[in-house]
Image (cartoon, coloured by chain):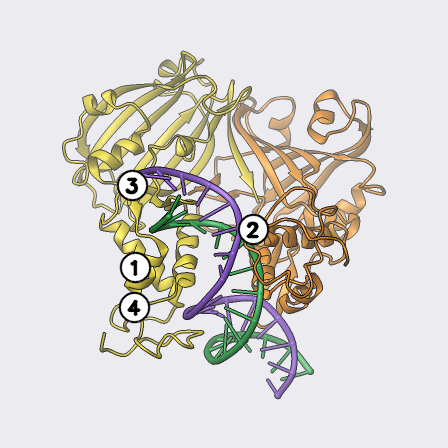
Chain colours: A orange, B yellow, C purple, D green
Amino acid sequence: MSTTTIPRAGDSAADSAQGPILTAAMTPSFSPLYQQIKGLILNGLRLGEWKPGELIPSETDLARRFHVSQGTVRKAIDELAADNLVVRRQGRGTFVATHAEQQMQFRFLRLVPDHGSPGSEGPARREIIECRRTRASAEVARALALRSGDAVWQVRRVLSFAGTPTILEDIWLPAAPFKGLTAERLANYQGPMYALFETEFNVRMVRAEEKIRAESAVDGRDVLLNTKHGAPLLSVERIAYTYKDQAMELRRGYYRTDTHHYRNNLS
Amino acid sequence: MSTTTIPRAGDSAADSAQGPILTAAMTPSFSPLYQQIKGLILNGLRLGEWKPGELIPSETDLARRFHVSQGTVRKAIDELAADNLVVRRQGRGTFVATHAEQQMQFRFLRLVPDHGSPGSEGPARREIIECRRTRASAEVARALALRSGDAVWQVRRVLSFAGTPTILEDIWLPAAPFKGLTAERLANYQGPMYALFETEFNVRMVRAEEKIRAESAVDGRDVLLNTKHGAPLLSVERIAYTYKDQAMELRRGYYRTDTHHYRNNLS
DNA sequence: CAGTGGTCTAGACCACTGG
DNA sequence: CAGTGGTCTAGACCACTGC
């Protein structure tokens, strides 16, 4: 590394022997060193250098690699862990977070039974109603940052808890990254859909935005969820994003809330 | 400080001259030093040593007071800041968080307009419908950790955005901490109700749990919210907690979601 | 036992704020 | 300008894991 180092805060002894590997070209705008390290590790995650569930290099390794102190790498990884992108395990190492872990099963599904804890009803039954290739409407295109008419997958499924159909979901996915998706692959997979996305399509959902409304069960949703016509349903519109903050899924969920509720903790 | 110091992780030079002020009697079970410091600062907040909006001592002051390094105090404050109990401002100091700040206005109100950002419709109109002293039902008592029949306040209010009644709330508060509450004081106060609780009753809400359901507008809620009878409403049941993790408020909100939605970010 | 993350300290310097 | 939080380093030792 022979180029000049970028301007940064709190530098003291770092430049004395050999500057950090970071250059102005790589990170055009000013930011603290640990933020840049975070960005570099994030790149590794984005590019699949370390896949979900895998071990990333130790803090000392990364410190050597980037020519910074362990404390700086530590602060970078602290933030990645706070963002749930990575999981620390004392004595073992730092792992790329995955939706396949039991711990993460209910991170994106906030509907819980009124009595009992998440999962206490046993595993949900997942039934694929439909999986077809179609063209993005203006609305779907806007949500997924596509153009109207671009190819998308449309999936419809029903989740049942304790034998009762409780959630109806319509899901739209851009066709390209999910090449080869079929109803069979969806139906045969045990576990969360996002875990399948990770292992089969190398798509890792890291965050999502939900808009929640109260609506009436119409348009056949009453039939699929076995409710009265016009019964109140919780409408949950989700846009899920990958590492690159790229929208990769639009999902419209309809939840029965007569025996379950959507939980949210404010702080 | 003549008593022995508690066992803790990673001690090296701290005990050499004079041990930290922490003793086994003060903190019976093992925990890292910075967690204990966090607990001590938390005590100060609980006991009102520093009130919402006020400046707490600098990191170096606290380090001297507790006989630990600044880095340890720093990590303690980092966690308090992550919990939104405290706000750091570079060059100025660390302040006790308050609901009166503009920044915190929408931390607990998650209903936002479909078009535009939170607050873009101008300030909400707050109308107190009712404020009466009554006795806790079994359900209210359970939520607030009281006994059935204990005295509670019951408040009912309507929030309107852009002239449209949008939120109806029924609120239950334990009578003792809110001695002297009246409809007038509630009505005359400009700003969030939780800000009034801070300044008038020394009650600071720090977190809350919400259970969200879809229901039908009945029991006069259709009238107060100017909707059709039986129209879908978002039901939001909240229990709010103070510093001591003590439940201090039960609130049942009914939100119209035809022009607004409840937003939630998952990560 | 070696290697990992976790804690703690000490000291240096930077960025920002207000008087 | 002094004082605050923010960054970075270096080194020590602890707690935990797996071989």
- The subunit letter for the residue under badge 3 reads B
Depth check, mark 4 against mark 1: the one in front is 1
How many C-alpha atoms fall within 10 Å of the one at disc 1: few (<14), some, or many (≥20)?
A: some
Position of the C terminus of chain A, as image quadrant, is: top left
Disc 1 is placed on an element classified as: helix
The amino acid at mark 2 is: Ala
Residue B224 on image: x %, y %: 35, 15
Mark pair 3, 1: CA separation? 17 Å
The verdict on a common chain for dots 2 and 4 is no
- The quadrant holding residue C5 is bottom right
The amino acid at mark 4 is: Thr
**Is B170 displayed left or right of B11 in the figure?**
left
Disc 2 is placed on an element classified as: loop
Residue in the foreground of this view, choosing between A86 and B233: A86
Mark pair 3, 4: CA separation? 26 Å
User: Badge 4 is on which residue?
Assistant: B27
The amino acid at mark 3 is: Pro
Disc 4 is placed on an element classified as: loop
The verdict on a common chain for dots 4 and 1 is yes
**Is B240 displayed left or right of A173 in the figure?**
left
Depth check, mark 3 against mark 4: the one in front is 3
User: Badge 1 is on which residue?
Assistant: B40
User: Badge 2 is on which residue?
Assistant: A9
Depth check, mark 2 against mark 3: the one in front is 2
Depth check, mark 2 against mark 4: the one in front is 2
How many C-alpha atoms fall within 10 Å of the one at disc 3: few (<14), some, or many (≥20)?
A: many
Q: Earlier in the sequence, mark 3 or mark 4?
A: 4
Q: Earlier in the sequence, mark 4 or mark 1?
A: 4
Q: Which mark is residue B52?
A: 3
Residue A137 on image: x %, y %: 75, 22
Q: Is residue C1 above or below residue B240?
A: below
